[in-house]
Image: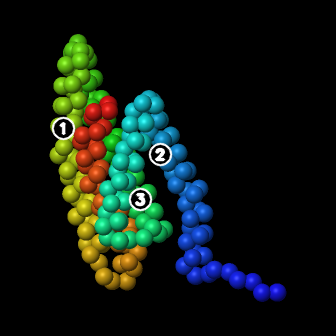
Amino acid sequence: GYTMAWSGQYEYMARATARMRVVVPATLAVVFLLLFLNFRNVGETLIVMLSIPFTLVGGVWFLWGLDYDWSVAVTVGFLALAGVAAETGVVMLVYLDHAWAKRRREGRAGVRELHAAVMEGAVERVRPKMMTVASTMLGLLPILWGTGTGASVMKRIAAPMIGGMVSSTLLTLLVIPAIW
């Protein structure tokens, strides 16, 4: 007639993990659908979706450096980071597409012109990307250093975003143009 059950934080984390198994794939599917509706091109949609795992690498490294365990708050931070990564990937592709379309309208559509269009589009994106990274990181650093009520949760939301912004910058400025 005796039973034993885990309760407290363990029970909360088990419920949250079960929910996240549904929410995370559903969120990624919605992001993919929205990207596809925007680009009308599976290739460019996949390039943007590929930016998400690369961006997550920086977040994982930063969590490891801070010795934070996985939690619901960390998952929320990664979901927010994935949104920022997709947004910056979309903007990079828009710049690349515009530079290439401009050259094609001018009747210049060779391999050299493609290379020049990639360089032009990527260089035009450096300043906006650095502004996005700087404003995001400067906005999140006080949260990471906070000590008040709720700071322990907020730090775990901010940490993956700060680390991920570093790898996102490198990815968006170097890898996406090369793949495109």
Residues packed near mark 3 inside 10 Å, few (<14), some (14 to 19) or many (20 plus): many
* Callout 1 amino acid: Glu
Is any atom of residue 138 visible in this view?
Answer: yes
The circle drawn on residue 177 is: none
Q: Is label 2 in a helix, a strand or a loop?
A: helix
Where does the image place residue 23, in percent across and percent down from the top left?
Answer: 55, 56
Q: Is label 1 in a helix, a strand or a loop?
A: helix
Residue 48's quadrant in the figure? top left
Residue positioned most to the right? 1
Q: Is residue 70 left or right of residue 138?
A: right
User: Sequence order check: which comes first, mark 1 or mark 2?
Assistant: 2
Q: Residue at x 37, y 54 (%)?
A: 56
Circle 2 residue:
31
* Callout 3 amino acid: Phe
Q: Residue at x 48, y 41 (%)?
A: 32
Circle 3 residue:
78
Q: Residue at x 42, y 36 (%)?
A: 45
Q: Is residue 126 above or below residue 143?
A: above
Q: Mark 3, mark 2: which one is toward the viewer? A: 3
User: Sequence order check: which comes first, mark 3 or mark 2?
Assistant: 2
Circle 1 residue:
124
Is any atom of residue 161 visible in this view?
Answer: no
User: Sequence order check: which comes first, mark 1 or mark 3?
Assistant: 3
Q: Quadrant of the C terminus?
A: top left
* Separation of residues labelled 1 and 3 (CA atoms): 27 Å
| Nearer to us in this view, 84 or 9 | 9
Q: Mark 1, mark 3: which one is toward the viewer? A: 3
* Separation of residues labelled 1 and 2 (CA atoms): 25 Å
* Callout 2 amino acid: Val
Q: Is residue 37 above or below residue 161?
A: above
Where does the image place residue 179, in percent across and percent down from the top left?
Answer: 32, 33
